[in-house]
Image (spheres, helix red, strand yellow):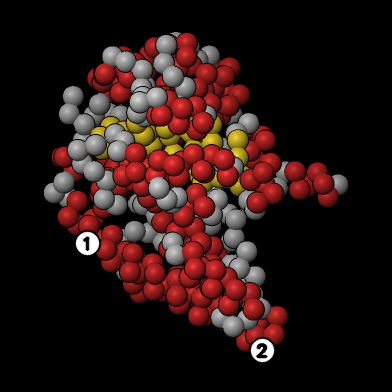
C-alpha cells in the first residue's frame, strides 16, 4: 500500500504540477516521459564547444534531454542550430520563470544562436476562463520586459506573438493540425468534450516555431528547445509530426522546477504570492516573504541546530541559492557545509538569500525599465 501511494505522489502535465518532486521522482519522471539523463559524456561534449559549463548543467538543474547528441553531431558538421522557448502570458513573471531563460541566454552567447521566443497569448486566453483578452495582452507586454531585461541579443532574438503573427504562423499550423488526431490530444492532455476547440488546436501553433526558421530559410535547420520538464508533452507531439512534414525533430533540454517558498519540491505557483518572488517585488517584500515563508531545513531551536545541523537538501533558501542565486561553486559548498554542520543558522541562510535576490532584482528592474524602449527591436518583422 505504501509503495502504491509513493507511485502516485506527483502528477506533471503542461497545465498543472501536483505533489513534491525529489531526485527519485525526477528519475521516475524521466522513465515515464521517455527522456534521457544528461550524463558526463554529454557534458564533456557541450564543454568542448562552450569551454566552460553553466552551473545549472553542473548541478543538474538541467537534468534530461532528447536528442542532444544528434544536435551536437549536426553542429559539428557545420549545421548550426537555433533556440526556441517561450512564455505563456497568464500573469506576472516570477523567479521560477527565469530559470530556463537565463540558461537559454547562456546557450545563445556560447553557440551564437538565433532565438525564437514565442508568446502564445492565444493559449492563455483559451485555457484560462477568468482571463480577458485585454489582460492577456497586458501580461504579454510585462513578460516581454522581463525577457529583454536578461540581456538577450536583439539582433539574434525574435519575439513571436501568436495573435500578432497569426498570418505567419497559421499557414504552417494547419499543416501540423492535419497530422494530429483528436484522440492524440485527448490522450496527451486529458481533454474532454467540454474542452473548447481553440485549446484543442493550440499545440499546432506551439509546434510552428520549432520549424519556422527552416521554412523561412528554405532549408532544414536543427532546433533546440530549453524548457521546464512539464512542457515536454507538447513537444512529444511536435517530434512525432515534424518528420512527416519533412523537418527535423527538435532536440530538447529539460530543467527541474524551482520550488515555491512554502514547500521544497513543489513547483512555484502564480496563485500564491506569499510562496513566490515576482520580478517586480520591492526589497522589503522580498525580505518579508523569505524570512516568513521560506521552508526551513533547520532545527526548531538554535541550540538544537548548533548541535545537529540543518538539512540543505530540503531547505528552500539553500535550494534557491543552488538553483539560481549563487553560481560560485566554492561559495555554495561552504554554505552547504556550514549549514549542515550547524555553523550557519536558518536565519543567516535566509538573510544571505535575501541579499542575493535583492541584488539581482535591483539590476533586473533597472534593465526592465530600459526594455520599454527596446521592445520593437525584438518583435519579429514579417
Helix, strand or loop under label 2: helix
Q: What label sits on residue 303 in the rendered view?
A: 2
Looking at the image, which is closer to me, 276 or 172?
172
**Label 2: how many Cα within 10 Å (few below 14, some 14–19, many 20+):** few
Q: Where is 308 relative to 363, above or below?
A: below
**Residue located 26% across and 18% down the image:** 217
Q: In which quarter of the image is residue 138?
A: top left
The answer for how far apart the CA atoms under marks 2 and 1 are is 42 Å
Residue ID at (40%, 55%): 94
Label placed on residue 366: 1
Residue 229 visible in the shown view: no
Horizontal and vertical percent position of residue 286: 39, 69
Q: Where is residue 308 in the image (x, y as percent from the top left)?
A: 70, 80
Residues tagged 2 and 1 counted as in contact (Cβ below 8 A): no
Q: How crowded is mark 1: few (under 14 residues within 10 Å), some or many (20 or more)?
A: few
Image side of residue 375 versus residue 301, left or right: left
| 238 w.r.t. 275: above or below | above
Amino acid at each position: 500500500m505504501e509503495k502504491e501511494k509513493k507511485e502516485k505522489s506527483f502528477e506533471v502535465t503542461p497545465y498543472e504540477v501536483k505533489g513534491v518532486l525529489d531526485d527519485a521522482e525526477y528519475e521516475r519522471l524521466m522513465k515515464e516521459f521517455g527522456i534521457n539523463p544528461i550524463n558526463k559524456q554529454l557534458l564533456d561534449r557541450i564543454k568542448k564547444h562552450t569551454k566552460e559549463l553553466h552551473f545549472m548543467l553542473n548541478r543538474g538543474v538541467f537534468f534530461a534531454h532528447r536528442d542532444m547528441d544528434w544536435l551536437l553531431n549536426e553542429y559539428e558538421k557545420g549545421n548550426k542550430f537555433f533556440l526556441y522557448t517561450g512564455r505563456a502570458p497568464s500573469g506576472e513573471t516570477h523567479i521560477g520563470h527565469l530559470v530556463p531563460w537565463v540558461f537559454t541566454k547562456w546557450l545563445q552567447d556560447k553557440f551564437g544562436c538565433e532565438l525564437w521566443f514565442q508568446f502564445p497569448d492565444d493559449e492563455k486566453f483559451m485555457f484560462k476562463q477568468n482571463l480577458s483578452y485585454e489582460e492577456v495582452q497586458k501580461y504579454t507586454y510585462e513578460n516581454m520586459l522581463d525577457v529583454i531585461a536578461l540581456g538577450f541579443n536583439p539582433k539574434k532574438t525574435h519575439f513571436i506573438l501568436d495573435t500578432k503573427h497569426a498570418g505567419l504562423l497559421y499557414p504552417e499550423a494547419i499543416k501540423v493540425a492535419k497530422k494530429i488526431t483528436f484522440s492524440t490530444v485527448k490522450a496527451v492532455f486529458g481533454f474532454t468534450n467540454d474542452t473548447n476547440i481553440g485549446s484543442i488546436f493550440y499545440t499546432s501553433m506551439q509546434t510552428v516555431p520549432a520549424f519556422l526558421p527552416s521554412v523561412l530559410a528554405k532549408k532544414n535547420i536543427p532546433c533546440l528547445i530549453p524548457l521546464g520538464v512539464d512542457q515536454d508533452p507538447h513537444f512529444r507531439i511536435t517530434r512525432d509530426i515534424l518528420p512527416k512534414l519533412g523537418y527535423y525533430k527538435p532536440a530538447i533540454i529539460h530543467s527541474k522546477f524551482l520550488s515555491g517558498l512554502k514547500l521544497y519540491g513543489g513547483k512555484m505557483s502564480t496563485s500564491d504570492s506569499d510562496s513566490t518572488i515576482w520580478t517586480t517585488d520591492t526589497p522589503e517584500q522580498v525580505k518579508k516573504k523569505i524570512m516568513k515563508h521560506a521552508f526551513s531545513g533547520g532545527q526548531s531551536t538554535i541550540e538544537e541546530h548548533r548541535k545537529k545541523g540543518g538539512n540543505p537538501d530540503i531547505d528552500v533558501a539553500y535550494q534557491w541559492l543552488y538553483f539560481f542565486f549563487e553560481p560560485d561553486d566554492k561559495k555554495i559548498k561552504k554554505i552547504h557545509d556550514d549549514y549542515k554542520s550547524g555553523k550557519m543558522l536558518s536565519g543567516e541562510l535566509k538573510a544571505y538569500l535575501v541579499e542575493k535576490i535583492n541584488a539581482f532584482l535591483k539590476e533586473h528592474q533597472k534593465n526592465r525599465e530600459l526594455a520599454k524602449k527596446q521592445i520593437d527591436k525584438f518583435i519579429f518583422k514579417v
